[in-house]
Structures are given as structure tokens and as C-alpha cells.
Amino acid sequence: MNIVFMGTPAFAVPILKAVHKYYGVNLVVTQPDKQVGRKRTIVYSPVKEFALEHNIKVYQPKRIKDDYDTVLNAKPDLIITAAYGQIIPEILLNTPKYGAINVHGSLLPLLRGGAPIQRAIERLYSTTGITIMYMVKKMDAGDIIAQRSIPILSTDTSEVLFEKLSYVGRDLLLETIPKIVDGEIKATQQEEQLATYAYNIKREEEHLDLSLTKEQIDAKMRAFTPTPLVYVLVDQNPMKIHRLKYLEDALTHEVENGTIVEINKDEIVVKVENGYIALLEVQLPGKKPQNVGDFMNGKGRSLLEVGTILK
């Protein structure tokens, strides 16, 4: 069976690894290399790194909707995608004998789109999962082949949940492929009226709104960790927050949301809508991340004090 695998981030690697081990992958399609940092260092996607290590042919079109002949020439019997990052043209969806399937990080029709794992945490979902579906022209709207759910823990960051779901996706896919090949699948249509969307994170969303509740702030922090992180403004400069927690204390300060009410050895305590959060690790532009103790012994001492209002 000729299999073309399309994916880009670390989430897709365990899935690719398993498919290649048990079936063999003839072609990997992944996003173009990135240039990172001031030196414009070329960085490969995790999927490309795996493919090169295992001598799998790699194809990296800038726009696959305009440049797909290499995939057609591979004559795939099955196309598998997992967080590829581009819309697949309809000609590729209709070509393979066994179809084109996607391993998606949500329980569809909930959270269609490019950031389902982050949005599930941000929106305080208690459960999420993996959906394997047939791909159609409309985004994440194809018939559902299989699903598996897992709980979202209060400590889960997007990084942790990405890893958990990558292995759930791997296992579910390995169970599903033989059923597809043997014609045993009875796919079900998605209930369109239940669809919700999880669009990619926009830059302006990184600015942390301190008028949210402490639970919402904690959830957004975990959803945006380790990237892109959230920030607050200090003297109009963004201060990134690498770690925070919310406090159980009852609300006693009658001050504006975002006001620093306490600074101690390890924490900067900030008033929010229904209580307090504590900043634990922060980063100023051009500086390395620092725990609050080191930060307040240095630059932070001249920037922050009790009563300062973070925006």
C-alpha cells in the first residue's frame, strides 16, 4: 500500500513513526523550512527530521493547492494527515483508493480548525480527544471514522496535551487503518448544528486580559504555554509570563483589576476579577526568563511595586 503522510509539528511524529513501522510511508509532505533568529538559521519541521532519519522522500510545497503533482505521482492508496497546516486540494482528497483521512485533535464537530488543543484548554473544557475522519473540501467537516476521548487535567499545558493526544491518535489510527482497508468502516456524518471552531491564535490574543477570572487566566496561560506565551504591559513594554498560578484566597482588596497587591520572595500577587493570581516567572524584552525573586532583585525593583497596575 502506497501511503503519503502529511504533517508538520511534533504532534504528528508518533503517528508517522507508527504508520511507517507497520505499513511503510512512501512520501512525507511537510511545511517549508523556517528561518529562525537573527542569524536566520534554517530549522526543519519535526516531521521532516524523522523522515530524513528514516530515508523517506520529503516534499515541501509552499502552497500545495497550486503544487501537488509530486503527491499525485506517488500514486497514494491512502493519504494520512496530522496537523499539516495547509488546506489540501480536492484533487488529492479524491485520488487515493482508500481515501484521505485526518487525525484531528478534538472531538468533532467541536473545535474545527488549526488550534483545537489550545482552545480546549483555554475554554475550560474538561474533556477532549482525537477524531479520525475522511477529509472533504470544507474544513474538518468530513465523516467521522473513529473517536477517542481523554480528560483535560487542571495541570495540562498545551505542550502536555499535544503529547498525550499524539499517542492517542497513533493508537486509534493503527486500530482504524485495517478496518478502512477491509471495508469495515461505517463513517458517520457530523452534526453540523453542533460545530464549534478553534481558529489559529492571533498575536493580539497574547496580551493577557486581567479582567478575566482567575480560572480563565490560568486556563489561557496553560493553553498558550510553552508558545506563544502571554504578556502584560509594564511601562508600555510587554512582560511575558512563563509561569503563574491562581490563589484560593477570598477577595479582600477593593482595587482595580491588574493591581499588584503583594510582592514577596517568590511571587507577584495581582488582583483579577474574582480573586488573585501570582506571577512566578517573567521575561522582559531582550532578557532571559527569570523567577520572580531574581527579577525583583534586578530590573523589576525599579519597575514594579505594590499598587502598580499591570495592563
Image (cartoon, rainbow, N blue to C red):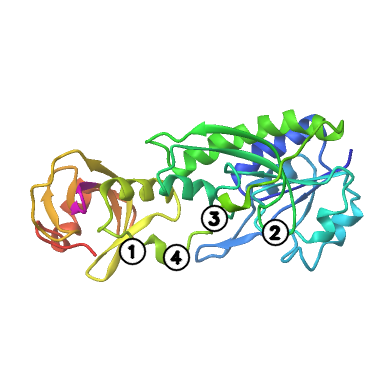
Pick whichever of labels 3 and 1 is earlier in the sequence: 3
The answer to which of marks 2 and 3 sits earlier in the sequence is 2
At x 79% / y 29%, what residue is drawn? 22
- For marks 1 and 4, give the one nearer the viewer: 4
Give the image location of residue 89, x and y in percent. 78, 61
- Which mark is on residue 285? 1
Residue closer to the observer: 218 or 40: 218
| Position above or below: 122 against 20 | below
Quadrant occupied by the C terminus: bottom left
Q: Amino acid at mark 2?
A: Lys
Q: Position of residue 175 (x, y in %)?
A: 73, 28
Q: Nearer the viewer, residue 40 or 167?
A: 167
Q: Secondary structure at mark 2?
A: loop
Instruction: Give the crowd class for mark 3: few <14, some 14-19, many >=20 residues within 10 Å.
Output: some
What residue is disc 2 on? 138
Position of residue 54 in the picture relative to residue 292 (left or right): right
- Magenta residues, start to end: 271-278
| Element type at mark 4 | helix
Do tag 3 and tag 1 residues touch (Cβ < 8 Å)? no
Q: CA distance from mark 3 to mark 1?
A: 32 Å
Mark 2 vs mark 3, CA separation in Å: 13 Å
Dots 2, 1 in contact, CB < 8 A: no
Name the spot of residue 211 as percent of width and height, x first.
25, 58
Judging from the image, what secondary structure is the residue with disc 3 in? loop
Q: Look at the magenta stretch and give its main secondary structure.
A: strand
